[in-house]
Amino acid sequence: MPASSEPQHPGAAPGAHTLGPHVVGQRVVVRRVLPGQTGPSGGPALTDVLGICRSWTQQSCVIERADGDTVEIRVRDIVSGKPVPPRASVRQRVTAREAELHTLSMWPDLDRSDLGDWVLRAGGLLEPEPEHPRGRLVARANSVLAMGDPGVPLPEAASAVAEFYSAHAQPALAQVEVDGENDQELTRLGWTAARPDEGDALFQVASLARVLRTVGRPPGTGMVLTEDGDRATVSVGTHARTRVALDGDWAGLHATWVAPTHRRQGLAVAVIAEALDWAASRGATTAYLQVVEDNHPALGLYRRLGFTTHHAYRFLAGPTG
């Protein structure tokens, strides 16, 4: 109910909004009458104001728009209004494709070919894992980033992808946004989950400054930081490591690992903090990482550090035979 004893403007509707002193500091949308002006239908002219409510009195409220300008609105002129969710951060407003393009800096020496918006990547990179002692392909470095429009009919694009990876003697893999159009269309063409034993993967982002404020400065752990241009590796002997790569003001973490015998000792936080501190000193403001959705310990850690999911993706394998 408007906090005013004044008569409302004839165009206003008493009780039509849930605004009041309690919304100061919140993001709101307010529809108001423009006194003395006539709308297209001949009635009072109306306009909407979206922004942060900075003050509220019985007579008026002040709304600060996104551009920093303020608008003072008489309470009696309010037609309707309500609080609205906070505006998504800049890092959350980029598309999945735009976010994923930042990962290309992780592996700058890949053989890369563009197909419209799609990016074909191949390098034969292997990563040792306990379940795969000989290593298995790093899928993000050996797949087509199939997000956006390939610029040709999808069956033709799928054939071009198959030819590209055949020429590299590698299986045809596609990284797609979960339940996106390309995921659905490639599935209709016979592409199937490349790693059915794993869940989908999550691309997570965070304010780099917030992560560093959260972790503080972990005690010294004998860390070694090795730089390679816009990339660095942080390690603690053979017990823990992570890699970080810069792309503009985005810093990506990759292959964070702690030996089973040294887990729950804060080493993961320590190497992440060291890597992001290095990235921050070079102007990074956004941190990102990728994690499988069923890796609950890692997800719990990243949530505590301030990471949230931007999008989910999966890998599809092309038909064989």
Image: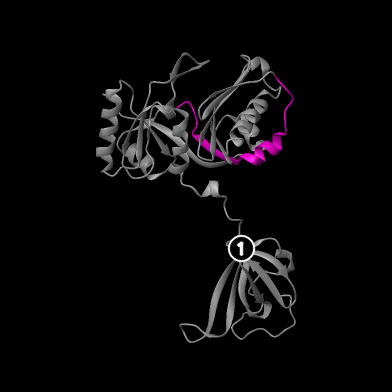
- What residue would you read off at disc 1? 68
Question: Which contiguous range is marked in magenta?
Answer: 196-221
Q: Position of residue 155 (x, y in %)?
A: 26, 39
Q: Measured along the vertical axis of the image, is residue 125 above or below residue 144?
A: above
Asked whether, in this view, residue 177 is left or right of residue 19, the answer is left
Report the number of numbered marks.
Answer: 1
Q: Position of residue 104 (x, y in %)?
A: 44, 33
Q: Secondary structure at mark 1?
A: loop
Report the amino acid beneath label 1: Gly
Which quadrant of the structure image shows residue 309? Answer: top right
Q: Position of residue 290 (x, y in %)?
A: 53, 33
Single out the residue that lies furthest toward the top.
133
Q: Which residue is more in the foreground, 181 or 30?
A: 30
Q: Measured along the vertical axis of the image, is residue 92 above or below residue 110?
A: below
Asked whether, in this view, residue 162 is left or right of residue 293, the answer is left
Label 1 crowding class (10 Å Cα cut-off): few <14, some 14-19, many 20+? few
